[in-house]
Structures are given as C-alpha cells and as structure tokens.
Image (tube, helix red, strand yellow):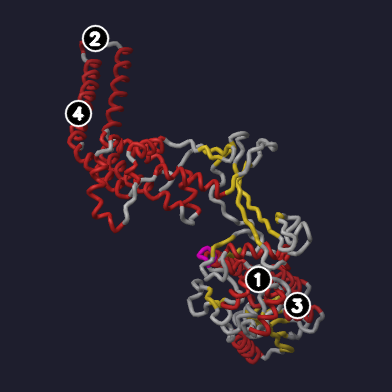
Amino acid sequence: MDIQITLKYIGYARKSSEDNKERQAASLPEQLYALEGIKAKHNLSVIEVLQESKSAHKAGREIFNTMLEDIEMGKANAILTWHPNRLCRNPLDAGRIIYLMDEGKLIEIRTPSRSYRDNSDDKFFLSLEFGISKKDSDDKSIVVERGLEKKARDGWRPGVAPQGYLNDKTTESGFRKILTDPERFPFAVKIFELFHAGIPAVEIHRIAKDEWHFTTRQKKRLGGKPLSLSMIYAILTNPFYCGKFEYPVGSGKWYEGQHEKAVSEEMFNEIQVKLGRRSQYKLKHHEYAYTALMRCSFCDSGIVAEQKWQCICTNCKLKFSLTKNNRDKCTGCGTLIEEMVKPKLLHYIYYRCGRKKDPACRERAIRIDGLEQQIDEKLSQVEISPLFMDWAIRQIHKMNDKGRDFREDAIEGIKRAHDACRAKLDNLLKLKISPANSDGSLLSDEKYREEKTTLEQELKNIQQQLGNVDERMIQANNDTVKAFNFVTRAKEKFAGNDLKVRRDIFMGLGLHLKLQNKTVLFDSPKYIMTLKKMKEEAPVIAERVAPEKEVVMKPQMEQKFASIPAVLRGQELRLAYEIMQLLSSIT
C-alpha cells in the first residue's frame, strides 16, 4: 500500500547581489509574487518563505544553509523556488541538494515551469540545470574579467575610487572614468604636500579633523566620518595618487592611470622612503631606459640597472643608505626619518655589470646622468641643422631625377641581356634535339648539362637585377628623407622624457655597446664617422638659425652648403645610405 507523504514547502527567493539594490530591487518582489501564485493555484502547504541577497557563485549563504538544515531535520521536505539557478550556482551546494534527494529527505523542488522529484530522470534534469547555471556563471565571470582588464589597460582602475576621487556613474558601463572629487581632492593634494614638507602624519590627522573638518565620502551605510590616522597613511602609501595602479592587486601588473594625479611620482617615491617600513608600496616596477643594451667589456656579463636612496640626517648630518634592512632610521643616531624635519633625500640610478659570468668583476658602475651625458655628446657628432637637411633632401631628389634617363637605359640594357640569354637557351635545346646530333657528335649530354646550367644561372642573375628597380629606388629615397629627419632631431628628442624614444636612439648609436671604466664604447656605425668628418670640414652644416631669420638666411646658407667639398663629391648620397642602416631600429 502506497504511503501518502504530506509535502511541507519552504519558499526560497534570492537576488544575486547584496550591494546592487537599486538595479535589482524588483527581483525579490517578482519572485515572491510568482511563488505566492503557485501556492494558491496548487493549494500548497508552505511553512516558511525565505529570501536573501547573496551571490550563489560560492558556498556559504547563511539563509540557504539554514533552509537545508531544516530539511535535514525534517521540518520541511520540499522547496518552492522561482528557478533552480536561484538555489545554487556552485557544485558544492548542488551536490548537497541532490544528496538530500537521494536520502529521501527532499521530496520535491517545484518551480513555475515544472517540478523535480526524487527519480533518476528528474534528478538528471535538475543536475543539468545546476550545471547550466554554473556554466553561465563561469562565462559571465570570464566576460567581466576581460572587460575589467581592458578598462585597466585603458588607464581606468576598476573598483571604488579612493578618497579625493569619484566613480563616474553617468557614462555607459564599461566606459566609466574616475573623476576628481571637487570637495576632497584639494585636501588629498595638501596631505602629500604637508608630509613632504616634514609635517608628521599625526599632525596632519589633527589638521584634517580640526581645521579642515574633512569627512569621508558619504555612502548608503558608510562614510561621513573624519579621516582616521590609518586612512592618512593609506592615502600616503597608495600609488593611485601618483598615477599608477596594480590590477588585480598582488598580480604584479602595473598600469598608468588616466586620472588626474594628486602628487608627482618623484614626490610620492620620496614619501615612501620617509615612511620606511610603514609603506607597503614596493618600488619594483621602475622602468629603466638602457637595460639589456650593453655588456661589460671585462667579463661580457649584461649591464643591469639599480636605484639607490640615501638620506642626510637632520640631527647628526650623517648621509646613510636606505636598504632592505634599514628603511626608516638613521644608522648613526637612530632617528626615524618620519620624525626628521625636512630630511634631504637623494635618489640615484646606476648602471653596473651584472657579474653573472664573473662574480668578482671589478667594472665600476656609472650613474645615469654620466651615461646620458656621453649619449648626448655622441648625438652632437651627428646633429645637422634643419636648413641643411631640407637642402640636402632637395639635392638628392634632383640627382635622382637627373639619373632617371640613365636608369631607364640601364633597364633596357638588362632586358636585352635577358632576351639574349633566353635565345641562347632555346638554341642550345634545338641543337641538342636536332637529327644531326642524334649520335651526340655535335653536343654531348655532359656538355649540354654544363652549358644549360651556366645559362640558367646567368638568366636568374639578370632577372634579379631587373626586378623591382623603380620600387627599390623610391623606397631608398623615402628612407633617406626619414634618415635626415632623424639625425636632425635625435638630440632634441633625446632631451625629452619618453624612455622608449631614448632607448631607441641609444640602440641606434651602436650594435655592440660595451661599458669599460665607466665609459661607453659605442662601436659607432660608419655614418657617425662620415658626419663627423663632414662637420669638421664644414661646421656650417650644423649651424642653427633662429626661426625668424630663416627666410633671410636661407639663400646664403644654401650657397655655403653647395660649396662644401664633401657634398660636391656626392657624399650626401652615400651618407644617406649609411644612415638608413640606423633607421631600421629607430622608426
């Protein structure tokens, strides 16, 4: 005889986020309305209706766990819910529900579309629904992560903006920026300025609280309170304020932010040195312009870069180094840097032998200012004036135009040689297969192969000469123009702050750069020596003319250029060709 089991339902409704109440405010009421309709239609016995705002991606929902505990204890034996994905989106919770069915403690899961009971088919489809929910969550997670990574690459840090900034809520999702908080941003800037000027963090905290009456940004449940001392330190050690951020945190991936900076990177780094061990910010993502480009002339190890910080104690006047073992106090008198009044901080970048091949190598390190001075001096040897560049390029084009007829005659000559060679091959074949040569008396097999191979190689060489003559000449002219542009402005570009441009220019000054006794051995290309010789013969090619005088001085300068012996010998064309070797690593 079948035993009639009375079903006692627990209603369960869930929305996916406890933070985003505005966007999903209608979610819970709609689910509860649907559950109430099922209850009335089928006259179900619902002992309790539970609802919670919690993501189901991970196990650990308190109300959900309470529901399963009630089912396990026998208080209920059925669940009424809007959809199986409201119950779980992770395999652990899904397994608990299926297990309760296997144990006979959970008889039914009812939704508006269907019911799932304790039989193999229903449990299979229920498991399939749970698997689809899990797959949907994983796919959404991948899409969200990809979008957040793109946002970080674009220079906008995902997440809540720190004090002094605001999240843009008006732009379309995915394109939102981080704006400055007009009320709090000036105070964030002032906090950095005061601490850099030697004001202790405790005093800054008092000023922010008592004089500025600074309060944090008001949120729904948090904010609207004065800054705590720990928040002062959090601001001082957050690299976001100097335009850099790490995302995800701890990943080692650093990005340049597009938001407005509250402090320069130089000042921020000095503040981290002052804070010593209080600072959790690691200065490890510094970019060096000239690493992996030079080798040690003694042991052939690679030249590496390192930065050093030193501090002059305001009490005992001792200059001491800041290291991993000593980051926050004077090694002489023990005074904390944070307590010093305007301590002088010194920052240096050195390039030295990596000593990978010889740990005892004694090659001395060179400071970056000394290295860049040597690069600047080398660039001065190839620098030419814009007036000479314009004139030289025009002369090259004129010479190219004059040589057009000669090139066309040369091309016709190559074509005639090509046709003659083809005729020889045809005649050779006719002789080989003629009836008169049936016994090989006129042309033997060995002699045929020998002459055929010679003619085919000759034909191949002619075809190589003929191919793309005009294209090569046009490309050479274009490269020449680019090359003259480079030698005219390389020194000016090197004086800028773009590390990549500096690196590319340094690479162009030599292919096998060495460091010997703090001196760079450039292994200079030939074009540097050519330019140096031309400048020695005629310094006028490097003379600069004020922009307002260019129109007046241009005819006189071009007359001087035309009288330079090296130019009259056609050296500018050879020079341009040599400069093109540099161009491939610069442009």
Q: Quadrant of residue 279?
A: bottom right
Sequence-earlier tag: 3 or 4: 3
Asked if 64 appears above or below 141 in the picture, the reply is: below
User: Label 3, label 4: how many angstroms apart (C-alpha)?
Assistant: 92 Å
State which mark lies toward you, 1 or 3.
1
At mark 4, the secondary structure is helix
- The residue singled out by tag 4 in the image is 413
Asked if 452 appears above or below 302 in the picture, the reply is: above
At mark 2, the secondary structure is loop
- The residue singled out by tag 1 in the image is 195
Sequence-earlier tag: 4 or 2: 4
- Residue numbers of the magenta segment: 151-155
Count how many numbered circles sit on residues in the image: 4
Alpha-carbon neighbours of circle 4 within 10 Å: few (<14), some, or many (≥20)? few
- Mark sitting on residue 442: 2
Q: Amino acid at mark 4?
A: Gly
Q: Amino acid at mark 3?
A: Asn
